Image: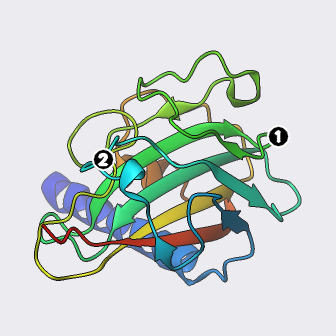
């Protein structure tokens, strides 16, 4: 009976997480996310790819919902061959007062030396490393899309270092006030 109760409890937790993620995914994007490096639906420059310098692009956001206390960021490629989606960047504990992220942000877990980003953490990307990992699609004739999604949160969650995308999405469940996305494309031709 204990095994059945534990299994049922785990199943219900899973359903709750799926429902929360679906509701966050169905939210209309109200936050404006932009970059001087490329326009929405534009091409991510070679410099920001793992074929180039592999440095993060500068990002800016505006129109945060009232009550935003902290922000989180996930960048992924939904059509990567494996794993799908491939996660390129996870960042969290970003203070709501921050208006964006600078170009070539450090890749260490704890972001230091930038007062407006005090407390920010770089989580684990799909390569199981901290920080930004730029576009690096195979030479497969496909134009890959890179989603830079910002989540506005209603609480200072002060999450520990070491979270990946799944961990982060579970941790912010029930705290998402709004989202916004910048999409860039990249194709490696040779």
User: Can you give x and y, in whole percent of width and height, for residue 143 in the image?
Assistant: 28, 80
Q: Is residue 171 above or below residue 63?
A: above
Mark 1 neighbour density, 10 Å: few (under 14) some (14–19) many (20 or more): few
Residue drawn at the location 33% of the way across and 53% of the way down = 49
Of callouts 1 and 2, the N-terminal one: 2
Asked if residue 154 can be seen in this view, the reply is: yes
Q: Quadrant of the C terminus?
A: bottom left
Q: Nearer the viewer, residue 153 or 62?
A: 62
Distance between the alpha carbons at the discs numbered 1 and 2: 31 Å
Q: Nearer the viewer, residue 170 or 144?
A: 144
User: Can you give x and y, in whole percent of width and height, for residue 90 in the image?
Assistant: 43, 46
Query: Comparing marks 1 and 2, which lies closer to the viewer?
Result: 2
Most extreme residue toward the top is 113
The label shown at residue 97 is 1
The label shown at residue 52 is 2
User: Can you give x and y, in whole percent of width and height, for residue 137 in the image?
Assistant: 20, 65
């Amino acid at each position: 009976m204990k095994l059945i109760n534990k299994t049922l409890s785990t199943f219900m937790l899973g359903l709750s997480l799926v429902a929360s993620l679906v509701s966050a995914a169905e939210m209309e994007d109200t936050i404006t996310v932009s970059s001087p490096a490329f326009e929405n639906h534009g091409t991510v420059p070679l410099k920001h790819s793992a074929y180039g310098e592999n440095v993060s692009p500068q990002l800016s956001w505006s129109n945060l919902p009232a009550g935003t206390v902290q922000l989180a960021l996930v960048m992924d490629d939904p059509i990567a061959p494996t794993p799908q989606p491939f996660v390129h960047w996870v960042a969290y504990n970003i203070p709501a007062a921050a208006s964006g992220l600078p170009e070539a942000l450090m890749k260490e877990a704890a972001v230091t030396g930038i007062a407006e980003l005090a407390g920010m953490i770089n989580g684990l990307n799909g390569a199981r490393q901290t920080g930004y990992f730029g576009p690096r699609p195979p030479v497969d004739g496909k134009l890959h899309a890179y989603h830079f999604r910002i989540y506005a949160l209603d609480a200072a969650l002060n999450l520990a270092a070491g979270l990946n995308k799944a961990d982060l999405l579970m941790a912010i469940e029930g705290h998402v006030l709004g989202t916004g996305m910048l999409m860039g494309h990249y194709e490696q031709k040779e």
